Image (cartoon, rainbow, N blue to C red):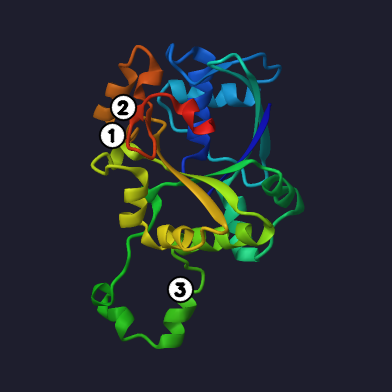
Amino acid sequence: MNKKYYIIGLPDSGKSTFLAALGYYLICGGHNDSIYKLGKNDDLDYISDLTETWSKCEELERTNINASFNISLQLIDNTGNLIDIIMPDRSGESFRNIIKNRQIEEDMLNDINSSDKILLFINPSKISNDSFIYEIAPEYRNQDAKKVEIENKNKMHEQAEYVELLQHIGRVNKDATDFKIIISAWDEYEDYKSPEELLKNKLPLIWQYVKTNKDLFNCEYWGISAQGGDLTNEDKKKELESHINACDRIIVVDEKGDISNDISKVLV
């Protein structure tokens, strides 16, 4: 059985960290009740490099804008079926360029059209806070409108960027696209009961768009903390490094709010 996923997200949305944690979980072994085990794979160099960095609780380098990696994994499910997973990994800037240039590269278009599901990564901690008129500094209120427009001509709120990205994808697919919307850095939002509740409350523009366009998007909602915590916090980093099995620091939350460490569940 073949499954093809396409990974989408703006810069710092958690795509590479997810792949690193997934690689570690599959290569080094998670738990006996895992959905998937790793099958026979000839080339794991790229994902192994990510995994090594992740296992040391080190920050991953951002994917180069000109780089594109096709990750191919053979997995075995808990009934013994062989499943081939294909996931292209591209930089967040390459998706931002779709918005800037209002066009999609042909190879990306073909990958999206041939994918069974799209994994859309969103990191709320990297989304700008909403601005209110009363919060605008007086020096901007008194500026000439044309000057303010020039100063802000390259600014688009990240929620609007995601909506525009979804609009482009909705146009290129004839049928409704199956999405798994993945909220990254879930360790910062554990007070929420479910990933969809968080999206609805913190990122309402994105939530409203996918909800009102059910003819274009079939969505699942997931919360993932692939690192398990903030690596810039030294106390938290020491806590994460203390895990005997690094898989235990992974947090995965499904649509019902059930929590586990099995990051491979996202690929079901």
Examine the rendering and report whether any part of residue 256 can be seen. yes
Tell me where residue 106 appears, x and y as whole percent: 76, 53
Few, some or many residues within 10 Å of mark 3 (<14, 14–19, 20+)? few
The correct choice, above or below, for 128 with respect to 177 in the image is below
For badge 3, the amino acid type reads: Asn
Q: Nearer the viewer, residue 121 or 10?
A: 121
Q: Of the residues under marks 3 and 2, which one precedes in the sequence?
A: 3
Are the residues flagged by discs 1 and 2 in contact, CB closer than 8 Å? yes
Crowd around label 2: few <14 · some 14–19 · many ≥20 (10 Å):
some
* Contact flag, marks 3 and 1 (Cβ < 8 Å): no
- Name the residue carrying label 1: 233
Q: Is residue 170 shown above or below 31?
A: below
Q: Nearer the viewer, residue 182 or 159?
A: 182
**On the rendered image, what quadrant is the N terminus found in?**
top right
Q: What secondary structure is marked by label 3?
A: loop
Residue 127 on image: x %, y %? 39, 55
Q: Which residue is mark 3?
A: 152
Instruction: Name which residue type carries label 2.
Output: Lys
x, y percentage for residue 53?
49, 24
Q: Secondary structure at mark 1?
A: loop
Q: Residue at x 25, y 72 (%)?
A: 135
Q: Which residue is mark 2?
A: 237
Residue 247 in the image: above or below residue 157: above
N-terminal label among 3 and 1:
3
87 sits left or right of 155 in the view: right
